Amino acid sequence: MIHRDQLVAACDHQLRSSQFKDFTVNGLQVEGRDTVTRVVSGVTACQALLEEAVAWRADMVLVHHGYFWKNEPVAITGMKQKRIKTLLDNEMSLLAYHLPLDAHAAFGNNAELAKRLGWKVEGCIDGELGEGLLWSGRLAEPLSVAELGGQLAAVLHREPLVVESPLVGSVERVAWCTGGAQDMITAAYDAGAQVFVSGEISERTTHLAREMGIHYIAAGHHATERFGVQALGEWLASEYGVEHRFIDIDNPA
């Protein structure tokens, strides 16, 4: 058992959340009971995750996608009211980290994806490692883009969408950013990547990849962002003795 505020402070410090300009509030978003014994982690603080957390009698819900995004309606009505009421009625805290959890050098989403695929991390294209969001590196061995897509499917348990450029053959140099980072493809190309891996795809991404000369793989927003929050939850369990359970609410996007 640990005090809620001590756990929050540890996460804030570890992720350096105050250094990021983000689209949401990073850290404690909804305050629950003072002490924490059980932490449920998940990608998004959807109603289904909250109900699983209630069933497990969790004290805290730890997510990558929380609430209070910029430009969203501020009124707490409808779906938002139901979610927040669930948290308050059950005295569960909501702890959310967006960009800080993408960027973290040890157990962020980018770091965890590379670890599972066996990629050699060489640096960060848009900043220092641990601060920037667009990472670069090399595959363990040269592969065709179809073979790389197969590896991603095996690791993520989701068939990726592969856009092959006729201007590129096999690949070794890779750039990646989990989630909805398809518009970083130009920066990835300019940095010399032969393939760019992210979560989502836009209509324009196909033409950019084909015509610039860089393969693109959309491996799923949810699928590519499952691992960081798990790693953070496991770190909390190891460092502070809380029980941790990751719950994966299926999302095909």
Image (spheres, grey):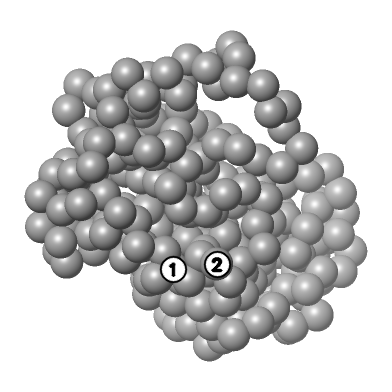
Indicate the position of residue 232 as horizontal and vertical percent values: 32, 59
Q: Mark number for residue 18?
A: 2
Is 193 or 99 nearer to us in this picture?
Answer: 99
Indicate the position of residue 26 as horizontal and vertical percent values: 52, 53
Q: Is residue 40 above or below residue 172?
A: above
Name the residue that disc number 1 marks: 15
- Residue beneath the point at 38% across and 71% down: 14
- Quadrant the C terminus occupies: top right
- Residue beneath the point at 80% across and 53% down: 205
Label 1 CA crowd tier, 10 Å (few <14, some 14–19, many 20+): many
Q: Report whether 177 appears left or right of 17.
A: right
Is 163 or 105 nearer to us in this picture?
Answer: 105
Indicate the position of residue 222 as horizontal and vertical percent values: 50, 42
Q: Amino acid at mark 1?
A: Leu
Calculate the distance from the C-alpha at mark 2 to the C-alpha at mark 1. 9 Å
Q: Amino acid at mark 2?
A: Ser
Q: Is residue 6 above or below residue 46?
A: below
Q: Is residue 193 above or below residue 196?
A: below
Camera sees residue 62? yes
Q: Report whether 45 appears left or right of 6.
A: right
